[in-house]
Image (spheres, coloured by chain):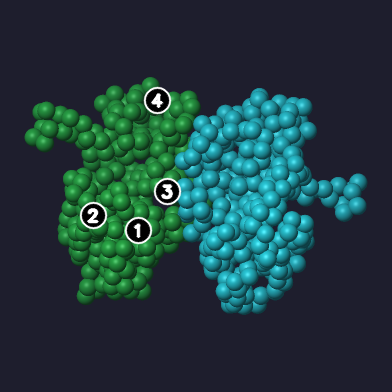
Chain colours: A cyan, B green
């Protein structure tokens, strides 16, 4: 069995650092995250709950907004209020939004300095051009931290990313390409149009699967001794569980795990890191806004 | 000899389209580009002159600003004026800036809707997330147009980019990864930390050299039948020329040209396309600002 990239363990270390920072500054008011939930999607509900719970557990305040917006304007008005509210350090609008809402318009309306999810194009652009002050999205930061926590350097390594979403694949490529010793990876981005995918995945020193298809990455696609990071969160039917489903990743974990050097499990790999990164980003905003 | 990716020829076609658009709208006032030159660097002078000349030749107005700024503030004030000036459709601040000037601060001060060079992080971010309205930098657009003009599709192709500058490599990767049939490339970005560079370049369907080192790409690094795009503009000593130097690319053209399917020369390849793209971006701004 290869090394397990344990997200809970790595996240615990981040939470510890966050709590130490909070203790050190001993500020009267805690960092505050505003969450905005716009749908009845159970997965979205569950994501928001976990983020709120993490806030509570680690000394952050959270402010939950539940809104079923009839149009863009209603949601923009709420964001205006949160942008102006001096108590709010971070704003998280849980995606996906209802189909009649203009997602890009909403995301661009969030004040970039409170955009702890890093989806504002200004933050995407700043991440692309090496600006360390930018908010990079939480999943890419989480993946980076997970590798660092396990002493896996990415400098000079060939990182093959499968999936080019705005939330994972593309910002991850931006982050890993940054010009600093903690980054400096050679990056290949693959997607549905990629020919000879296997030829590329077999070259990866670090393979990152962010496709959204259960068990897409099979043993024959993975290079011996490589590092495999699984970003997938797929619900598949399972009559043996109470809920009737279970969550699996994009990687065929059972068969891949003995071939690679290290692998992240699902659940318990990237997921916990994403939430820890959200709190890191919120703390970063808090410290900057209050000049601490 | 392989197919020559002739930048002058492809640029001519773009200029023709631009002139047809200008004729069709028959607007009283032409699109206007403001250029800002801040150094005595002869290369910078020459670049600006060529852009101004292209404006003159194709029915654009240009407004040249020559300023040796003593501090950021002086340059920011000029940009403020250009941002506010309704006559100005595009603002181009020629890089590099003097060393005492904060480049990112200056570039972020240009109104994104007049940022025809595409260096504002908001435009970089929008390009990364498939926003077709974003201004993408001129060299990446020029490379894309040069390939299109020669009926070379990039969809599904493995494009290997060497160089990760903010001006070429990274925005080029963003553009080529966009989710539309004219893009959809698989993209690998290499740089000084890349190990086994040759192993990667030999896999490229399309190899793009943006390194800034004369004749860096040798025949043994190029795959038989591939497409090679040379973005380099390097001055090397040449006693046989009047100026004492000549301009060469990043590719060892003479030795590579018979191995690949198509290749862009230097000069006369990407260079002319970059200027044509600048006029395209300025026209785009003009049409949008005047709601034409």
Q: Residue at x 64, y 57 (%)?
A: A25
Please state the chain letter of the residue tagged with numbered disc 2 in the rendered image: B
In the displayed structure, A36 sits above or below A252; it is below
Residue A73: tell me if it is visible: yes
Foreground pick, A157 / A28: A28
Horizontal and vertical percent position of residue B150:
33, 43
Horizontal and vertical percent position of residue B43:
21, 45
In the displayed structure, B146 sits above or below B117; it is above
- Cα separation, mark 4 vs mark 2, equals 39 Å
Label 3 or label 1, whichever lies nearer to me, is 1
In this rendering, position of residue B255 left or right of residue A71:
left
Same chain for marks 4 and 2?
yes
Label 4 or label 2, whichever lies nearer to me, is 2
Residue A274: tell me if it is visible: no
Label 4 or label 3, whichever lies nearer to me, is 3
Callout 1: SS: helix
- Which disc is residue B171 wearing? 3
Q: Of the two numbered discs 3 and 1 on the same chain, state the one appearing first in sequence.
A: 1
Q: Of the two numbered discs 4 and 2 on the same chain, state the one appearing first in sequence.
A: 2
Question: What is the residue that sits farthest to the left in this orientation?
Answer: B242
Please state the chain letter of the residue tagged with numbered disc 4 in the rendered image: B
In this rendering, position of residue A14 left or right of residue B214:
right
Binning the other alpha carbons within 10 Å of mark 1 as few (below 14), some (14 to 19) or many (20 upward) gives: some
Please name the residue that numbered disc 4 is placed on: B221
Please name the residue that numbered disc 2 is placed on: B38
Q: Residue at x 70, y 73 (%)?
A: A67
Binning the other alpha carbons within 10 Å of mark 3 as few (below 14), some (14 to 19) or many (20 upward) gives: many
Residue A110 in which image quadrant = bottom right
Contact, CB < 8 Å: mark 2 with mark 3? no
Please name the residue that numbered disc 1 is placed on: B106
- Cα separation, mark 3 vs mark 1, equals 19 Å
């Amino acid at each position: 069995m290869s090394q397990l990239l344990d997200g809970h363990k790595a996240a615990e270390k981040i939470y510890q650092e966050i709590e130490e920072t909070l203790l050190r500054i001993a500020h009267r008011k805690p960092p505050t995250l505003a969450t905005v939930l716009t749908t009845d999607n159970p997965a979205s509900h569950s994501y928001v709950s976990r983020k709120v719970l993490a806030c509570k557990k680690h000394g952050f305040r959270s402010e939950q907004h539940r809104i079923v917006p009839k149009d863009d304007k209603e949601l923009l008005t709420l964001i205006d209020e949160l942008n102006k509210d001096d108590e709010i350090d971070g704003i998280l609008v849980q995606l996906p939004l209802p189909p009649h809402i203009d997602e890009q318009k909403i995301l661009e309306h969030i004040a970039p300095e409170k955009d702890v999810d890093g989806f504002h194009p200004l933050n995407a652009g700043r991440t692309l051009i090496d600006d360390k002050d930018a908010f990079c999205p939480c999943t890419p930061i989480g993946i980076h931290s997970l590798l660092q926590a396990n002493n896996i350097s990415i400098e000079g390594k060939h990182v093959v990313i499968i999936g080019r979403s705005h939330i994972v694949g593309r910002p991850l490529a931006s982050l890993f390409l940054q010009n600093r010793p903690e980054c400096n990876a050679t990056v290949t981005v693959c997607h549905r149009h990629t020919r000879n995918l296997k030829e590329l995945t077999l070259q990866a020193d670090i393979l990152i699967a962010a496709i959204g298809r259960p068990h897409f990455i099979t043993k024959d696609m993975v290079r011996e001794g490589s590092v495999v990071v699984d970003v997938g969160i797929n619900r598949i039917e399972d009559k043996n569980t109470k809920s009737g489903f279970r969550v699996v990743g994009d990687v065929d974990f059972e068969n891949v795990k003995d071939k690679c050097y290290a692998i992240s499990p699902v659940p318990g790999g990237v997921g916990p890191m994403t939430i820890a990164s959200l709190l890191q980003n919120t703390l970063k905003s808090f410290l900057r806004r209050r000049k601490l």
